[in-house]
Amino acid sequence: MRMRIRIRFIMLLFLMIATNCFAQAQQRDVEANFEKLQKRETPQWFNDAKLGIFIHWGLYSVPAWATPTTTPDKVTDWPAFYKSNPYAEWYLNSLRIDGSPTKKYHREKYGEFYDYYSFKDSLLNDTEKWKATNWAELFSSIGARYVVFTSKHSDGFTMYPSEIINPFAVKSMINSPRDFVGEIAKAVRQKGMKFGIYYSGGLDWTFNKKPVTNLWPDLFESMPNSDDYTAYVDAQMLELIHKYKPDILWNDVNYPKNGDLSGIFSELFKANKNAVFNDRWGPNTKFGDFSTPEYQVLDSITTHKWETC
């Protein structure tokens, strides 16, 4: 009996050592790939594209409501900011905060028990006659060179019929049956513009019901990092890359710390060798074809590409 236990212990120890060696080797591979990414030349088309269109459109566009307070660059009281969040696309987060103006508005407008995800029916009904070609015509006429569109914001709702199963949400409520992403991608490319995909990798409120109420540490603590979420986000990222071959991959807020970024970027450049990606992949990542300052005017010349909205 003792011999069996000892053998099992030795086998377990060997497995732990082998796993640790594999993890270290994998980390070295990731770091080597990131080093290559840092040295990568930004494709010329992005250097020449001075104006782009950035679209946040989803379930939150149905109520289309927020309290106009202040911009993030001027915030001194973050709990107050999140309670009266001026971003309409953060409607669901604001709705979950007791005493928020959004919660009061939602109760009076739709009823206390009206589920946020029921906005899907209105979104689809209201856009029945909507045409992506009309948008593309407008964007092209003002000289835009690229269009970035929301595939999934922090509410977790996908603006395309994703095949990746969300373990915490019913497919019929969390995925659009209409492929808005595909329609817009086709329309803008037909007009000679580049197409980009926005994806909220760091926040998904279907996996974490806790609302964000403070910038630090609350924001990062509320980011889901479970194995379920990591697998879900990795799979959805790859789905978007293979399905739409984006010219721009625009991740927001963060990315799960154990996510397969190396594999994602490898697949991105296989699908589209002239693709570019932004810099919002985590607090410790120092790479990206371009940086993304918001509400800022750069006060000096920088050689690294940037995009500000």
Image: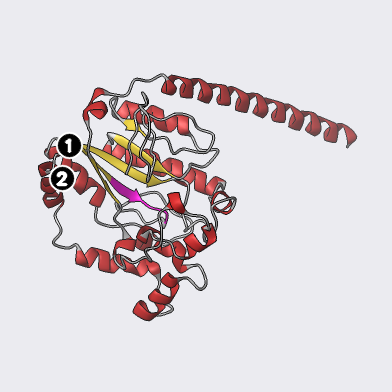
The residue where tag 2 is placed is 139
Viewer-nearest residue: 165 or 290? 290
The residue where tag 1 is placed is 193
Dot 1 amino acid type: Met
Magenta segment: 149-154
- Which image quadrant is residue 105 in? bottom left
Q: Residues within 10 Å of mark 2 (few under 14, many from 20)?
A: many
Residue lying farthest to the right in this orientation: 2
- Which image quadrant is residue 263 in? top left
What residue sits 41% from the left and 19% below the top? Answer: 39
Dot 2 amino acid type: Phe
What residue sits 10% from the left and 46% below the top? Answer: 137
Q: Are marks 1 and 2 in contact (CB under 8 Å)?
A: yes
Q: How is the image coloured?
A: secondary structure
State the CA–CA distance, disc 1 to disc 2.
Answer: 9 Å
Q: Residues within 10 Å of mark 1 (few under 14, many from 20)?
A: many
What residue sits 62% from the left and 25% below the top? Answer: 24
**Circle 1 SS class:** loop
| Mark drawn on residue 146 | none
What residue sits 23% from the left and 40% below the top? Answer: 52
Q: Is residue 297 left or right of residue 209?
A: left
